[in-house]
Image (tube, helix red, strand yellow):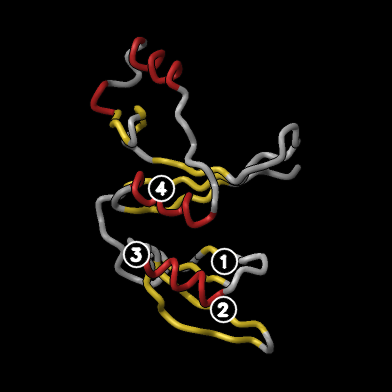
Amino acid sequence: MAYDIQICIDCENAHAQADWWAQTLGWPVEEPDQDFIDEMLAKGYAAPEDLIEHNGVRMWNAGSAILQPVPAGSALAPTRILFQPVPEPKTVKDRIHLDIRLAGDDVDATRSALEARGAKFLWEARQGPHLWYTMADPEGNEFCIS
């Protein structure tokens, strides 16, 4: 049997990170089911302090996710990236990272646009004719663009 996966990224501010990555990838932020939130509150499984208002929407304060767009009616589940807050800051290099394939967009222009939005350029690498830049998001999580 094949399984779906979810990618989880530890961070300080889950909602800001989800917004940043949603803009970077062109993916939407997952909208929480407001009826489900009401049901969890009514049944006592959640309390008002478990929620925040972010961009005018009630959201769980325990994290925020973005979803890869998939065609309507597709049997494929969208890839989901969950940003979850942790108490400790990032202190060492990531052992796993995202590779962003730019589908023909200019890598230098994309790098500049990401830096203008808070990303940091770390280094350039090359393998044969293939060039990529290793970057860090606003909280220091590494990713590559090519």
Seen at 54% across and 47% down, the residue is 27
Nearer to me, 117 or 58: 117
User: Is label 4 in a helix, a strand or a loop?
Assistant: helix
- Label 3: few (<14), some (14–19) or many (≥20) C-alpha neighbours in 10 Å: some
Q: Position of residue 25 (x, y in %)?
A: 53, 55
Q: Are marks 1 and 4 in contact (CB under 8 Å)?
A: no
- Label 2: few (<14), some (14–19) or many (≥20) C-alpha neighbours in 10 Å: some
First of labels 1, 4 by sequence position: 4
Question: Quick one: quadrant of the N terminus?
Answer: top right
Q: Are marks 4 and 2 in contact (CB under 8 Å)?
A: no
Of tags 1 and 4, which is closer to the observer? 4
Q: CA distance from mark 1 to mark 4?
A: 18 Å
Q: CA distance from mark 3 to mark 1?
A: 18 Å
Q: CA distance from mark 4 to mark 2?
A: 24 Å
Q: Position of residue 74 (x, y in %)?
A: 75, 36
First of labels 3, 1 by sequence position: 1
Nearer to me, 119 or 13: 119
Nearer to me, 61 or 115: 115
Return the residue found at the far bottom: 128
Say which residue label 3 marks: 118
Question: Quick one: quadrant of the C terminus?
Answer: bottom right
First of labels 3, 4 by sequence position: 4
Of tags 3 and 1, which is closer to the observer? 3
Q: Are marks 3 and 1 in contact (CB under 8 Å)?
A: no
Say which residue label 2 marks: 132
User: Is label 2 in a helix, a strand or a loop?
Assistant: strand
Q: Label 1 sits on what residue type? A: Asp
Say which residue label 4 marks: 19
